[in-house]
Amino acid sequence: MDKDNIDYKIIDHTADIGLEVYGKSKEELFLNAARGMFFLITDTQLIPARNKNRKYYTVNSNASNIEDLLVAWLSELLFIHATEFVIFDDYEIHSLTEQMIKSRAGAIKIKGSPYQIVREIKAITYHNLRIFQDRTGRWQANIVFDI
């Protein structure tokens, strides 16, 4: 498998589930982490489609470092998903630093959508959380989700 051409892959973890996420930039890494999380939830590769019921959410987070920021941002997306009964399938990052992200995410209501919830994610954990650049400059994150 050519790691340069994949966005994320599922990694086995006792009682939980993890992702190894890749990106050419920090922005792409964050986008791929969100896409991977919603793949885990739906077991479907989500592709934004025209939908008159699409709603966009402003999703901004602050944290003390990049790892905390990824957890905070994914947690906010997960919270909106759980409370608004939506599936996110479209993301735009307007600004990203080591401590702050400003983004907009598009979602559709689960009811009436082609998606089904196959796995509930309770939380994004700090277990084995790691974000780094490999020797080629590509970004990678290891994330474990509590299911």
Image (tube, rainbow, N blue to C red):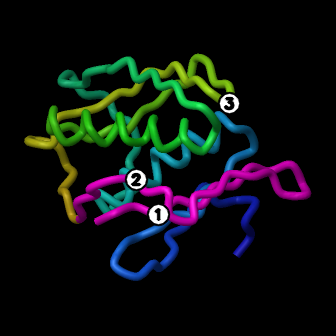
Q: Residue 143: x, y in percent?
A: 52, 59
Residue 144's disc number: 1
Relative to 140, residue 11 above or below = below
Quadrant of the frame with the N terminus: bottom right
Residue ID for mark 3: 98
Magenta stretch, residue numbers: 119-147
Mark 2 = which residue?
A: 124
Residue drawn where x is 18% and y is 56% of the image: 116
**Which image quadrant is residue 72 in?**
top left
Numbered-mark total: 3
Residue 64 covered by magenta stretch: no
In the image, farthest residue toward the right: 135
Instruction: Name the kind of residue labelled 1 in the image.
Output: Val
Mark earlier in primary sequence (2, 1): 2
Q: Say whether disc 3 or disc 1 marks the residue closer to the N-terminus.
A: 3
Give how far apart the Cα atoms at labels 3 and 1 are: 20 Å
